[in-house]
Amino acid sequence: MHATVRRYEGVDVKGTDELKRKINETLIPKLSKLPGFSSYYVIESDNGVFTSVGLFGTSAEADESSRVAADWVREEKLELTLPNAPKITGGKVFAHKMTNGTISA
């Protein structure tokens, strides 16, 4: 399993409601159709920072999710809400544990 973490700083707080809606309505469906998709999480910090964590089967599949996310920002015209390119970290997951519960927004 491979993870991709994208940290978006300087998020325009005036656009966060629209951003959250679009993430749920259009980005997550796109990502979930990618080969190797396992799960996707978005964390909102109080200081204009959004962080996403995507889990995929291979490194290449995780890398593809970053390309899809970048294209999505342009397609949804979110450049003003997300003015800075994300800081991307990725790698092989070597430890994890999941419960049988479901996480939803």
Image: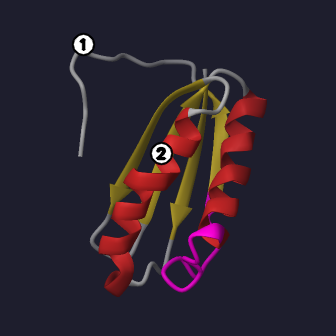
Work out whether 55 lies above or below 89.
above
**In the figure, residue 22 lies in which quadrant?**
bottom left
Tell me how the rendering is colored: secondary structure
Relative to 27, say whether 87 is above or below. Answer: below
Q: Residue furthest top?
A: 100
Which of the two discs, 2 and 1, labels the residue nearer the N terminus? Answer: 2
Classify 58 as above or below 23: above
Which class describes the residues within 10 Å of circle 2: few (<14), some (14-19), or many (20+)? some
Which residues are drawn in magenta?
A: 75-87
Give the residue number, with chain letter if any, for mark 1: 100
Q: Is residue 59 left or right of residue 75?
A: right
Q: Nearer the viewer, residue 65 or 29?
A: 29
**Which quadrant is the N terminus positioned in?**
top right
Q: Position of residue 105 (x, y in %)?
A: 23, 46
Q: Amino acid at mark 1?
A: Asn
Horizontal arrangement in the rendering, residue 87 relative to residue 39 (left or right): right
Tag 2–tag 1 contact (CB < 8 Å): no
Q: Secondary structure at mark 2?
A: helix
Q: Nearer the viewer, mark 2 or mark 1?
A: 2
Question: Which labelled disc corresponds to residue 49?
Answer: none
Mark 2–mark 1 Cα distance, whole angstroms, equals 21 Å
Name the residue located 43 percent from the left edge and 19 percent from the top edge. Answer: 96
Above or below 81: residue 87 = above
Q: Which residue is mark 2?
A: 28
Circle 1 sits in a helix, a strand or a loop, which is it? loop
Residue 80: in magenta span: yes
Magenta residues, dominant SS class: loop
The structure residue drawn at horizontal position 21% and vertical position 20%, both measured from the top left corner, is 101
Q: Which residue is pictured at 36% across the width and 73% down the height?
A: 18
- Count residues near mark 1 (Cα–Cα under 10 Å), then give few for <14, some for 14-19, many for 20+: few
Q: Kindly identify the amino acid type of the residue bearing the numbered disc 2.
A: Ile
Residue 86 at x, y = what percent? 61, 65
